[in-house]
């Protein structure tokens, strides 16, 4: 069973629009960690955020914000006032305290149209 | 600090050939891992290591071997390359456990097996 589901394969928005990338995870652990990574067209993987399962506070970093809801097992990522430089593939990932493995979703490809 | 380095950047192999993808990090990270990235599949864990002399299998280990003789190096060996191993390979490292720490990724190796 997929531990991390990113149902949105591709999203296109016009510059300055807000966009939310969905991430749903599955785990039986009570302690776990969630991550978002960005992969721009150049191909490298860039860490964006880490969140542990005990901290449900939403986080904002500039135009980026993350909404963590344990009740729905979701860790969604919103970009406000999108820019062309936000065009990338975004990956959500889960790691469980019980193991030593990361589980990545299949990614969401975001295209911001100027 | 070079971070995580991978060589080569590109490689073309013929079916049945063997080769080693090199990965090194200079951050004294205990945890290292190898992923493959295929279209629509996200990143899938091949093998990982929690320290020198310790390795374990991930989600897709078949056809690959690893060893961890030093903290710095974590080579990935393809024993007999197959077209199904055509992919982009990423090496990553993080502080102990990996589960609760961000992973630092190398630039990737694009492998084509003919």
Image (spheres, rainbow, N blue to C red):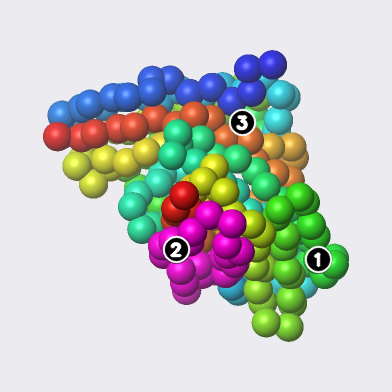
**Range of the magenta residues?**
A1-23
Are the residues tagged 1 and 3 within 8 Å (C-beta)? Answer: no
Helix, strand or loop for disc 1: loop
Contact flag, marks 2 and 1 (Cβ < 8 Å) = no
- To the question of a shared chain for discs 1 and 3, the answer is no
Q: Quadrant of residue B36?
A: top left
Could you give the CA–CA distance between mark 2 and mark 1, rounded to whole angstroms?
A: 23 Å
Q: Are marks 3 and 2 on the same chain?
A: no
Q: Chain of mark 1?
A: A
The chain that hosts pointer 3 is B
Query: Few, some or many C-alpha atoms within 10 Å of disc 2 (few <14, some 14-19, many ≥20)?
Result: some
Q: First in sequence, mark 2 or 1: give its number.
A: 2
Q: Say whether mark 1 and mark 2 are on the same chain.
A: yes
Residue A18 belongs to magenta span: yes
Circle count: 3
Which residue corresponds to mark 2?
A: A11
Mark 1 closeness class: few <14, some 14–19, many ≥20 residues within 10 Å: few
Q: Residue furthest top?
A: B1
Residue found 64% across the figure and 57% down from its top: A81
Q: Which residue is mark 3?
A: B53
Q: Is residue A77 magenta?
A: no
Instruction: Determine the image quadrant of residue B52.
Output: top right
């Amino acid at each position: 069973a997929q531990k991390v589901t990113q149902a949105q394969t591709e999203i296109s928005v016009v510059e300055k629009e807000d966009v939310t990338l969905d991430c749903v995870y599955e785990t039986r652990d009570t302690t776990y960690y969630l991550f978002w990574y960005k992969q721009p067209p150049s191909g490298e993987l860039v860490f964006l955020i880490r969140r542990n399962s005990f901290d449900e506070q939403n986080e904002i970093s500039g135009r980026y914000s993350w909404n963590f809801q344990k009740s729905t097992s979701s860790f969604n990522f919103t970009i406000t006032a999108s820019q062309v430089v936000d065009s990338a593939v975004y990956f959500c990932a889960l790691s469980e305290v019980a193991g030593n493995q990361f589980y990545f979703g299949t990614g969401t490809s975001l295209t911001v149209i100027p | 600090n070079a971070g995580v380095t991978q060589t080569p950047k590109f490689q073309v192999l013929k079916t049945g050939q063997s080769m080693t993808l090199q990965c090194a990090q200079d951050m004294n990270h205990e945890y290292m891992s190898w992923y493959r990235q295929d279209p629509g599949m996200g990143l899938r864990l091949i093998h990982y290591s929690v320290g020198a002399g310790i390795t374990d299998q991930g989600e897709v280990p078949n056809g690959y071997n690893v060893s961890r003789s030093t903290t710095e190096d974590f080579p990935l060996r393809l024993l007999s390359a197959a077209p199904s191993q055509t992919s982009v390979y990423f090496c990553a490292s993080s502080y102990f456990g990996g589960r609760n720490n961000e992973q630092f990724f190398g630039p990737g190796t694009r492998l084509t097996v003919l």
